[in-house]
Image (spheres, rainbow, N blue to C red):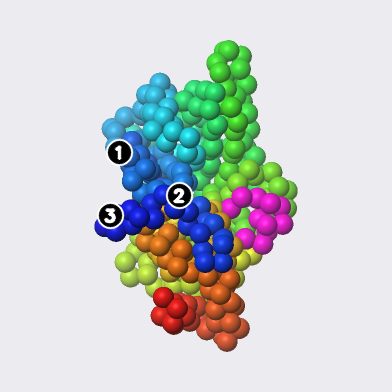
Amino acid sequence: AQERYTSIRDKPAQSLDGRVISLQMNAGLMADLPSLEGSGADGVGLFRTELQFLIRNQMPKRTELAQLYARVMDAAKEKKVIFRTLDIGSDKVLPYMTAEDEPNPALGWRAIRVALDRPGVMRMQLQALLRAAKGRPLSVMFPFVAQYDEYTAARAEMDKAIARERILGHPLPESLEIGAMLETPSLAFAPQRFFEEVDFLSIGGNDLKQFFFAADRENERVRRRYDTLNVSFLSFLEGIVNRCNRTKTPLSFCGEDAGRPIEALCLAAMGMRTLSMRPASIGPVKSLIRRSNLEEVHKVIVESRERGDQSVRPAVMDYLRGVT
Ligand code: PEP
Ligand code: MG
């Protein structure tokens, strides 16, 4: 299917009204990296580091991880890779870390919560990332941050890891950005200084949507029940975009919806400038953005909301049928 889009592979995702959207890819294994070139992605917006842990039956060693991360950066060449620290718990159970029997795993001891309670693994991982990056830029983000102090605590771990590397005389990354994933509604209402301090934010739409609508992303009965283009959800996303604009915090969106052309178009029209998706989605999303006027799409969204529609999808579809 990707062949269909080779003619636009090296062209920007620029809309008819001149807005350029950065399309990035999600990855998690070394085998994903060749897609970076094939898909024409601008970088890896989400590298899910837990996959490396999930495919083994014991904890990987720091040196192994450092080698792997270095190979990922080598393969990405000058393109940016955002490494997400270990996101386990909920749907991703690590057999060799104590599997806790929890009544509601999605709301339970997972991701950054585990990392802050048992910092050993995160420390090892941060050190591996620093060693892999030596002399190169490094971007790291923490998953499932629900409140400001979780970000500052995780960031303090990074500061400690850097101090240790410095004492050991190891080379440090050329530059460092540390972001957070916005996956719980609470973080959208964090204090202003959180938005000022964080280097970037990435919306984890899969989790954010499940918590916004209280609809389990793993449950077939409810997972498709609520439309991402529901006006309540869009208003909520708009609030996040506005807060990030005020503090000039770079914002991206990296859930599955970023790879669905109509959803991606609406997200871009609502002001998201970076979308990260599976590689195969880059072509279709880019193709639609290049054929669209985002200002007009935004107008269609605003009018649909003002009319009192539940979802803006029918209006956007109507509009697209008229112009494409
Ligand atoms: C998300 O929640 O949208 C996300 C990108 O992370 P994951 O799907 O790995 O939870
Ligand atoms: Mg998530």
Horizontal arrangement in the rendering, residue 300 relative to residue 100 (left or right): right
- Identify residue for label 2: 24
Q: Quadrant of the C terminus?
A: bottom left
Q: Does residue 224 appear anywhere in the picture?
A: yes
**From mark 2 to mark 3, how far is it between C-alphas?**
18 Å
Kindly identify the amino acid type of the residue bearing the numbered disc 2.
Answer: Gln
**Where does residue 20 sit, x and y in percent of width and height?**
54, 57
Q: Is residue 56 magenta?
A: no
- Identify residue for label 1: 31
**Where does residue 159 sit, x and y in percent of width and height?**
63, 28
Question: Mark 3 packing: few (<14 Cα in 10 Å), some, or many (20+)?
Answer: few
**Where does residue 290 sit, x and y in percent of width and height?**
46, 63
Residue span colored magenta: 240-251
Report which quarter residue 63 is drawn in: top left
The first of marks 1 and 3 along the sequence is 3
Badge 1 marks a residue whose secondary structure is helix
Q: Does residue 161 appear anywhere in the picture?
A: no
